[in-house]
Amino acid sequence: MNQQKIKINSAFSRSAETYDVNAAIQNSLAEFLDAKLGYKTPTDILELGCGTGNFTARLIKKFPGSHITAVDFSEAMIRRSIERTSNNTHIKHLCTDAEVYISKTIERFDLITSNATLQWFNTIEKAIQDAHNALKETGTLAFSVFGQETMGELQQALSHAYGRSIDLPTRHFPSMDAIQNIVSRLFSSHDIQEKRLSKKYGSTMDILHNMKRTGTSGGNRLPSMLTRGKIQLMDNWFKDTYGSCRISYQAYIVTAEK
């Protein structure tokens, strides 16, 4: 596991107890992704990045007889998922790097799915290729993923406060073209839907606290680089530009048939 993955793992592990009540955007994506499933019942399901088990619980409800392998690299997150799904006997949890697991597994699945996780992988193109290889002959890949325009307002506010361009980890999230290119090459059919969501926060600090409580800072501890004066500049920028602290999220809901 490289240093960036270690930082991401640490951030998510620290947020395991606070994630669920603060992950409204991720929960919305889970609902969108859930709605894309269900036209056929899979026997074997692989979930990459199960986190606290929010989407895992949806899979159990939708496919009660299916066997589910739920993978996440955070022990703290896995524990939460195990607690949430303890009544189900058809689920197996694995605490390991999902990106590594999908590249090495010899198991084959009817459905491989992931909610709001693949943007944290080192190489999403390879992960999709590996998922294709791990699917059965008529398998389905279905995932939601954040796009690179996510939290653009926060990046602008930071750049304004510091008087120079500041990049967030979101700048390295996938684009529509990148996803389109890989799934169209590998799969016989696919569908990609862009979703734009937004959320209002009381202040810049509320934004930063939400990132901390959901582990979505990408391993970067933004508050440590911000002074009270910089945060005030950001608050003023949000008010002048949008009237309030508003953050938008770009996401893609992807389904692909082998």
Image (tube, rainbow, N blue to C red):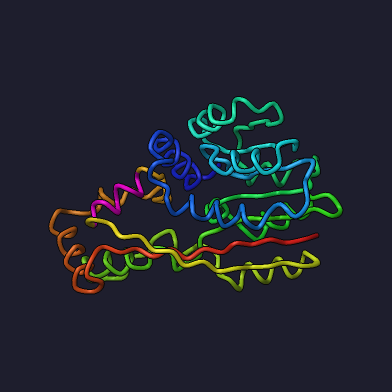
Q: For the view shown, which residue lies furthest in the right direction? A: 137
Q: Residue at x 49, y 63 (%)?
A: 172
User: Which of these two is toward me, 61 or 139?
Assistant: 61
Q: Quadrant of the N terminus?
A: top right
Total count of labels: 0
Question: Is residue 22 or residue 164 the one in the foreground?
Answer: 22
Residue 251 position, x and y percent, is: 51, 63
Is residue 143 highlighted in magenta?
Answer: no
- Residue 206 forms part of the magenta stretch: yes
Quadrant placement of the C terminus: bottom right
Q: Position of residue 80 (x, y in %)?
A: 50, 31
Between residues 135 and 89, which one lies in front from this camera angle? 89
Say if 41 sits above or below 95 in the image.
below
The vertical placement of 22 against 153, above or below, is: above
Q: Position of residue 106 (x, y in %)?
A: 80, 40
Residue found at x 79% / y 50%:
135
Residue at the (64%, 62%) spot, across then down:
254
Residue 158, percent across and down?
27, 64
Q: Relative to residue 256, is residue 29 drawn left or right?
A: left
Q: Is residue 212 left or right of residue 113?
A: left
Residue 149 lies left or right of residue 164; in this view the side is right
Q: Give above or below for 208 relative to 155.
A: above
Q: Residue at x 50, y 45 (%)?
A: 5
Task: Determine the main secondary structure of the stretch shown in magenta.
Answer: helix
The range drawn in magenta is: 204-212
Res 125 quadrant in image: bottom right
Q: Is residue 257 above or below residue 113?
A: below
Which residue is situated farthest in the left direction here? 229
